[in-house]
Structures are given as structure tokens and as C-alpha cells.
Image (spheres, rainbow, N blue to C red):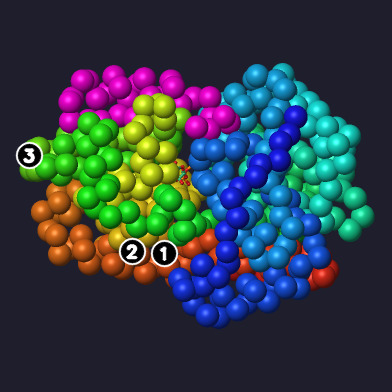
Amino acid sequence: MFSRLDHPPVAYEDYRPLLDSKLADELATVAGEMGQLRVLHLNSTATGGGVAEILQSMVPLGNSLGIETERIVINPDAAKFFDVTKKIHNMLQGSEGELSSAELDIYFSCIQRVANDMRAKGLEADVWFVHDPQLLPLARLLPKKEGETWIWICHIDLTTPNKSVLDALMPLTQDYDQLIFSQSAYVPKDLGDKVPVLIAPPAIDPLTSKNTAMDLPQARKIVAAMGIDTARPLVTQVSRFDLWKDPWGVIDAYRIARESVPGLQLALLGLSQATDDPEGAKVFQTVVDHAAGDPDIHLYFDPAEMPVSVDEVVNAVQMASAVLIQKSTREGFGLTVTEAMWKGKPVIGGDASGIRVQINDGVTGFLVSSPEQCAQRLVELLQDDALSARIGVAAKESVRQRFLLPRLALDYLRVARAQVNGRIPAVSDD
Ligand code: UDP
């Protein structure tokens, strides 16, 4: 009911040239002090979505820092588990409705069986990093052993949660030693002060095949193989097909912008990989309908149809696009924004909390609240290469300073060390 995942090793030294020396040295020091501890990261999908993306790099980075770090993915045995947890995810981000007692029963009983399996198989660690609401009940259902530290990390946008789901789930946070949210605005108001909170925004791995700069001819070759005309301008949103990512609004913005930029093409890349997101196919179908057969709207859902690996496709599409859009209405953080900024691309983001943290409007990208605004910024950027270049340079440096993986590793390890040493870390916002 759970699996261990292996990830190819990385070398910490390869990250150093990208880091400010203060951060690089502190990370090595903290890791050195934690060398004897065993660390586990647990989440609910092996691939697809931001958390899987972070963990596939965080785990090998931990090992390369000399800390025994493992990755566990749960495989719950009830088909409906991910329907329920997707509903929980949507409600935590603000959708209406209530969880029925049958749904709560599926949620708790699945995690109970996962917990029993972990106990039976002797899964052990000194520090447990449990990611996102899917696994939240684990600390209650697999009570911690003496000396263990349990940390729950919530990656989603909790600015306007549905109160009923918050009331049902937040008591479970009290079974942890430490909580981590991506922003202070996400910390639920009546969480209490028993369990300390750290604010740690996510980060990208600059060394993966997704994020290492691909040269333009190579990128163009790949997008051409995907049916895109490389002689005409391209704008793209890279995102799961999900309610909160507003793919329909992206199409509306493209249609308006195209009136001023003839020949404009749009790509929506949402290659379905997340086992914990059962809604993708349904949302995709509505987007197909909304695109209404426009041959210049390129929609991608099936990874099997891609000419190269998903990571290379994402890299190529980001590199070959003149502008990246991330028109989310809710966004816990939005790694796709970071990935595009790291490639020196101008990004137009929806004015959602996670994107606001990354984009300084007019300096490192643009924030928009409607398809019309999005279209206006698209036209400005497509018609002004100097503006695009200036924003791209500022965007890349901002990511280098704030949102590369070693900074997040340091946040996690600092807080784990403080817990292990019995100290309570302070809340900070960056
Ligand atoms: N992603 C991908 N292929 C796709 C669409 C998205 O690999 O077709 C990746 C994307 O590059 C990013 C992650 O999935 O690394 C999405 O993370 P984000 O934080 O933007 O959104 P989430 O899916 O977690 O809501």
C-alpha cells in the first residue's frame, strides 16, 4: 500500500555555482549536523504536479548532502480515495460543498490501512515530512514513536477555504510537531499556537532536464514535431487541466490578442501524469470544446503522443514560447511560473497568492485578473522584444535568489534540526 521510489543521484557540488555562498555554506553545515538522521518524504503521487516535482529532486539532494533520505508514495486500495482527496483539495481552495460521512470514511479508512501496512513492514525514520492533505491523517493513525519528528507540509492555496472542510481536517494538524505552509496568508486563523509554523515557499531544481536551458534550435525541433509552426509566435500555458488553472480564460485571452497579433498560436500542455488527480480528463474535454477546432490552439493531454520525455517537452515548449501564461485563479505557488522565469521568459500570471509571491508586477512578469488584461499584456510583450528581454532577465535573477531547490532544502533541514534539538523555529515569510 506504499512504495519506495528510487531517484538518480545528484551531486550537491553541482548546485553550488548557482547559489550565494552564505546559503551554500549554511546548507552544508546544517546537513553535516544532521548526518545521522534518517529522513522520509511521503506523498500521494509518484509523478505529476508540483509536489512530485519537488520530491524527485529533494530526496537525491538530501542524500548527496549526506543525510539518508527516502521517498515513499502511498498506493491506497480504494478506487474512490483520490476522488475524495481531489474534492478535499478543491474545497480547501474554496469550492463549495460538504464532505459526506461516507467520503470521510473512505479518506480515514484508506489512510488507516496505509498506516497499518507501514507499521507491519517496519517503516522507520527520525524525521517524517508528510506532504499535502491526502496524507494528513497519517500522524494520528500511525502514532509517532519516541524521538520521531513529524512535519506536515501544505502546498495548496488556503486563502479562501471552504470552512466545513477546514473544520473537519485542521484538528489533524495538531498531531504533528511542525507545520509548513507556502505563505503566511495560508495559515488558517484558528490553528492555535501549539504546533509551530514555518513559511517556506516551494522551489525548482535548476539541474533537471526540464530546467537546464535547452538551446533554441533543439526546442524548435521538438515543438515542430508536436505540430506547432515555429515560424509564427507561440504562447503557452503549461498546467494540469484543472479548474483553478483557468484554461478557458487562457483561450479567451489568446483570441483577443490574436486580433492584434495575426498568426498567433496557443499551446496548452497538461500531460496527464498525476494519479491523485482524477478530474483531468473531464476538464480536458471541456477545453477541447472551448477551443472549437481552432487549428492554432494546440492541446496536449497524452504523454504517450509526445516525441520526447515529458520533462524535455516542458523545457522545449517553455523555451520556444515568446510568453508563458499561468492564468490560475487559485495557486498554492505555481512551479510552472518559476520554471519559465528561470528560463528567462516573460510570464503573465493570474493574480493568485502563489503567483503574486513570485511575480513583481511589471518588473519580473505581469499579474492579471481577466482574459482582457491577459490579452493586453500578451500583445505588449509580443510587440516589444526589449520589454520581454528586460523582464526575462529580472525574472531569472529573482528565481536564482529565492526559488532554487537548495534554499527549500535548507528551510526543511533547519526546521527539522530545530525540532530534533528541541528548539522552536520562528515564522518567517521568505
Ligand atoms: N508539468 C509537467 N507536464 C505538464 C504539465 C505540468 O511536467 O504537461 C509539471 C510542471 O512543469 C510543474 C508541475 O507539473 O513542474 C506543476 O506544478 P505547479 O506547482 O505549477 O502546479 P500543480 O500541478 O502542483 O498544481
Residue at 41% across, 64% down: 399
- Mark 2 or mark 3: which comes first in sequence? 3
Which residue extends farthest right? 146
Q: Which residues are magenta?
A: 273-300
> Quick check: 259 left or right of 23?
left
Amino acid type of disc 3?
Pro
Nearest the viewer among 276 and 372 is 276
Residue at 74% across, 58% down: 68
Mark 1–mark 3 distance (CA, rounded to whole Å): 32 Å
Does 286 lie within the magenta span? yes
The disc placed on residue 262 is 3
- x and y percentages locating residue 400 in the rendered image: 43, 68
The part of the image, by quadrant, that contains residue 134 is: top right
**In the image, is residue 31 above or below residue 58?**
below
Q: Which residue is mark 2?
A: 395
Residue 350 visible in the displayed image: no
**Disc 1 element:** helix
Does 162 lie within the magenta span? no
Q: Are marks 1 and 2 in contact (CB under 8 Å)?
A: yes
Q: Are marks 1 and 3 in contact (CB under 8 Å)?
A: no
- x and y percentages locating residue 174 in the rendered image: 78, 49
**Disc 3 element:** loop
Ligand 1 sits in quadrant: top left
Mark 1–mark 2 distance (CA, rounded to whole Å): 6 Å
- Mark 1 or mark 3: which comes first in sequence? 3
- x and y percentages locating residue 406 in the rendered image: 56, 65
